[in-house]
Image: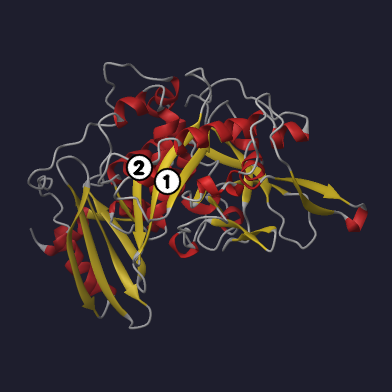
């Protein structure tokens, strides 16, 4: 095929769309010191590629990806340097091989099940919402790419995702996107823990867990549950006890005693799906339980300040001891990683921002931002269209996967988790008796909801 014809077969795509495809790369869409200059695809994303620019050397390189027969991405060509973007595009147009059959599976590889083909166990309302509504097409596309990017999902992943463990499996996909986005290599060479992550010879094992209700349908589609009105109940009552029972239940499995985990950092990654909407308000109960400190306000007017009040037990009906991180028996737990953003709303926004925008669909995100003004104790409300310049300007690179990811570090950890491993997360750690925060983000969303508007006649 003449080069001119090959060039006509490929079309430009947004950087964000290519970055979503690039989650399948070992270290995600991270090409430092180069950056994405232009991105392209052909044949409804059966092949994709980008031109990279090294700003220091002023030269261009190319990266070409193609789908395998199981739809997963594989790198087929890296070339350069080239002196101009035109010469790089000429090379990329050839290496993308538009029109060629899908790439074969590597020897010994098995084709993974299709994520959206219903199985014999039926489907959940959440899965039906994702796969049958135009308003959630962006989420479907983003979720599909994250599933294909998983190194080695277990045999139950697809049936779980399609039924009552939808939220738990969605959390795993969210974690993968957060980790790869930060340049972390994610491995799934063992059944458990779920992930081994490594970067620059720094490692950590991660086991994902969700706080769920005893009833299988809780936490999914249903009537929105508001936060308890009593502040002490929110901080030290049932939400904190649920976190405590969930974490302690996982710790009883003694992952740290496995031969391949011994002597390495180990963290539990936690999300809350115990009620519809609980992830919006339950977060503040977690550090209360972990550090055994209740955040109280003292003083009046300009003298108001937050203080940590030590507590011995949670106030729920079981009276569970507070301060998991105060107990030397759990020194093998390096940290607890938490996020309230492993939701369909997050995937929907990220897919929408990547370019999958059904006609007539708009998104409004409403929530509260952490106010970093010295002495400020109240959050800052916001309400913005997801595709507006004002929303994009909240963060240096627009909305990212890891902006809601928080790492609570255990001050007694035998093998501490390095802050360098997850630079895009918000880190909480104890220093001189105080709990301090470190983050690269000026604006941190504490909680939010995403409101969808569709044109008449569309769902």
Task: Examine the rendering and report whether any part of residue 360 can be seen.
Answer: no
Mark 1 lies on a secondary structure that is helix
Determine contact: label 1, label 2, CB under 8 Å: yes
**As rendered, which of 409 and 301 lies closer to the eye?**
409
**As rendered, which of 211 and 405 lies closer to the eye?**
211
Q: Which mark is residue 445?
A: none
| 329 to the left or right of 47 | right
Task: Examine the rendering and report whether any part of residue 250 can be seen.
Answer: yes
Q: Residue furthest right?
A: 300
The residue indicated by pointer 1 is: 175
Residue at 51%, 24% in the rendered image: 220
| 228 to the left or right of 448 | right
Q: Position of residue 355 (x, y in %)?
A: 41, 48
| 16 to the left or right of 12 | right
Residue 256 higher or lower than 59, as above or below: above
Q: Quadrant of residue 442?
A: bottom right
The residue indicated by pointer 2 is: 194
């Amino acid at each position: 095929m003449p080069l001119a014809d090959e060039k006509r077969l490929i079309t430009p795509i947004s950087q964000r769309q290519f970055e979503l495809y690039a989650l399948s790369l070992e270290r995600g869409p991270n090409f430092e010191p180069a950056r994405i200059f232009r991105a392209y695809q052909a044949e409804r994303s059966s092949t994709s590629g980008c031109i990279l620019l090294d700003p220091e050397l002023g030269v261009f390189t190319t990266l070409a990806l193609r789908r395998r027969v199981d739809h997963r991405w594989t790198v087929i060509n890296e070339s350069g340097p080239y002196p101009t973007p035109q010469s790089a595009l000429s090379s990329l147009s050839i290496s993308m091989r538009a029109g060629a059959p899908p790439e074969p599976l590597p020897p010994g590889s098995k084709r993974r099940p299709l994520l959206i083909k219903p199985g014999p166990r039926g489907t959940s309302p959440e899965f039906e919402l994702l796969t049958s509504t135009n308003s959630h097409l962006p989420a479907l596309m983003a979720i599909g790419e994250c599933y294909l990017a998983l190194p080695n999902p277990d045999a139950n992943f697809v049936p779980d995702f399609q039924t009552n463990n939808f939220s738990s499996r969605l959390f795993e996909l969210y974690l993968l996107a957060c980790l790869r986005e930060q340049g972390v290599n994610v491995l799934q060479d063992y059944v458990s823990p779920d992930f081994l992550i490594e970067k620059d010879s720094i490692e950590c094992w991660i086991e994902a867990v969700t706080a769920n209700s005893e009833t299988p349908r809780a936490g999914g589609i249903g009537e929105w549950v508001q936060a308890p009105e009593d502040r002490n109940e929110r901080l030290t009552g049932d939400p904190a006890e649920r976190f405590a029972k969930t974490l302690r239940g996982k710790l009883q499995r003694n992952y740290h005693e496995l031969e391949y985990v011994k002597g390495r950092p180990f963290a539990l990654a936690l999300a809350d799906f115990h009620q519809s909407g609980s992830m919006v308000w339950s977060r503040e109960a977690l550090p209360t339980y972990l550090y055994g400190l209740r955040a109280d306000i003292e003083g009046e007017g300009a003298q108001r300040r937050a203080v940590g009040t030590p507590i011995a037990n949670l106030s729920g009906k079981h009276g569970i001891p507070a301060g998991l991180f105060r107990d030397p028996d759990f020194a093998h737990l390096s940290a607890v990683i938490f996020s309230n953003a492993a939701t369909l709303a997050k995937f929907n926004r990220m897919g929408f921002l990547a370019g999958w925008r059904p006609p007539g669909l708009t998104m409004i995100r409403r929530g509260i931002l952490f106010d970093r003004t010295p002495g400020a104790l109240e959050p800052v409300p916001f309400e913005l269209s997801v595709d507006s310049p004002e929303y994009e300007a909240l963060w240096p690179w627009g909305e990212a996967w890891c902006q809601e990811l928080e790492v609570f570090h255990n001050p007694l950890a035998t093998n501490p988790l390095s802050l360098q491993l997850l630079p895009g997360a918000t880190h909480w750690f104890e220093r001189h008796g105080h709990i301090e925060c470190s983050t690269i983000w000026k604006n941190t969303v504490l909680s939010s909801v995403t409101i969808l508007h569709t044109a008449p006649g569309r769902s």
